[in-house]
Image (cartoon, helix red, strand yellow):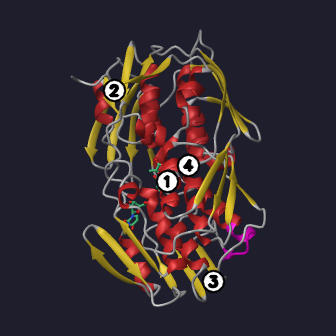
Amino acid sequence: MANAERFIVQGLEGKRTLEGELQVLGAKNAVLPLLASAILFKDGIELSNVPLNEDVKRISEILEKMGVVVTVSNPGKLSINTKSIDEKGTIDRELAKKIRASIFLSGPALARFGRVTFPKPGGCVIGARPIDLFIENYEKMGATITTEGDEYVVTTDGKLKGCHIFFPLQSVSATETFLMAAVLAKGKTILENVACEPEVVALAEYLNACGAKIEGAGSSTITITGTGLLSSKGEIAQVIPDRIEAASFLILGALSAKQLKITHCRPSDMRVVIELLRKAGVDIEEGKNSLTVRNNPDKPTQYQGFSFRTHEYPGVPTDIQPQLATFLTQAVGESPVFETIFEGRLNYTTELVRMGANILICDPHRAIVKGPTPLEAEQIDAPDIRAGFAYIIAALLAKGYTTIRNIYYIDRGHEAIESRLQAIGVDIRRVADTPIV
Ligand code: EPU
């Protein structure tokens, strides 16, 4: 998706001079399923620590098209009133095509209205991202699926039926969607081989606090006993800190800062990234809700390379793979990177190579990064949120001014990133694209 804005970033040419504090906002991937869960509620829900990024705005717009009232009050407070929700169960086609997370809405909507229509969702360009697990398992819960044009129409005679679902692979969105659908299903649903990400746990904890019966979230099997519509009774969903944003800041700090304190984060959710960076030689001090990374700018540590493979939680998140690979361009040695989750998620490396990185793509899932290599400024296009952030890091490492286009992708996952980075000394400007006349 093209964007009418770009970032221009002045590189530091490897100098580690940034200084200050960066506050981590609420997790994009925790707030999106929470927003969808509002459909399970008679009255609605309130959320705090909400990042007002573009994905949150898109899901809010889809909810509004369903008759839900979404009210944003600063800082980070959002309330969703579902009292006048439309019973038709239509998920806006055009909006849903822009964002993969729209699929979250299909489960609660089907469970509540007995019917839902939705298109195959869009989103970041990181691979095929099929939705077969959703289609198959709605049928398993008693629904009938037809298609009209490019939309799925899913209906049930009455309530969805609880059943035993074994997922052949761990999918975050399928776990969260079926967990929500099962809250309104008849009887017990057992979900096996589910995702164990902290965002899944946070969703289950909030729904349980509001009357749901969900056991086992955080383990590989979750059991849900259908209860009927929920009521929040004043219970506020506090969005957990964004572990990917925190880890991205940590990598940025390791490569470019004299001292950077990352606050409002949960180090326990990002253990693997902290350990990999420490192994590479990064000086990280851990607090209860903060991480501080330090460098001696006069004698910067030469980091060492390492190999890693992306893995479901608690392994290395695929969402931090591009930022880690960018780190490895500055580390000594040959570092093999194995992206196991998405087959399109190494494509961004071509732009890093244009900037001077030495990266060999072995196949769609494997690359070898050889470092260290100096980077040069370039004009590059962000293909997704995380590679977009990796490009900010690369731009900071480079010599000269790098232009990053398609920054809508970065805005999808990080609220007002440029003003936050400016506060620690980054020279980054948002510039409107000049229309060609
Ligand atoms: N998959 C299928 N069939 C399905 C669903 C998934 O084959 O029906 C496959 C995917 O193609 C992939 C694997 O299962 O190979 C895991 O994908 P998953 O379903 O877990 O991904 P997701 O739920 O669509 C979430 C995050 C992503 C993150 C992945 C993996 C949200 C809103 N999105 O996506 O976040 O990369 O889990 O951890 O939670 C991002 O934040 O930049 C982002 C892309």
Label 4 sits on residue = 28
Query: Quick one: label 3 or label 2, which is nearer the N terminus?
Result: 3
Q: Disc 3 residue type?
A: Gly
Give the quadrant of ligand 1.
bottom left
Q: Which residue is mark 3?
A: 226
Taking 53 as reference, is 194 above or below it?
Answer: below
Check mark 4 vs ligand 1: CB closer than 8 Å? yes or no.
Answer: yes
Quarter containing the C terminus: top left
Residue underneath mark 1: 61
**Where does residue 245 sit, x and y in percent of width and height?**
57, 40
Q: Are marks 4 and 1 in contact (CB under 8 Å)?
A: no
The magenta stretch is 207-215
Label 3 to label 1: alpha-carbon separation: 28 Å
At label 2, the amino acid type is Ala
Q: Circle 3: is it few (<14), some (14-19), or many (20+) Cα within 10 Å?
A: many
Q: Nearer the viewer, residue 269 or 67?
A: 67
Q: Tell me the amino acid under the disc marked 4.
A: Lys
Residue at the disc numbered 2: 357
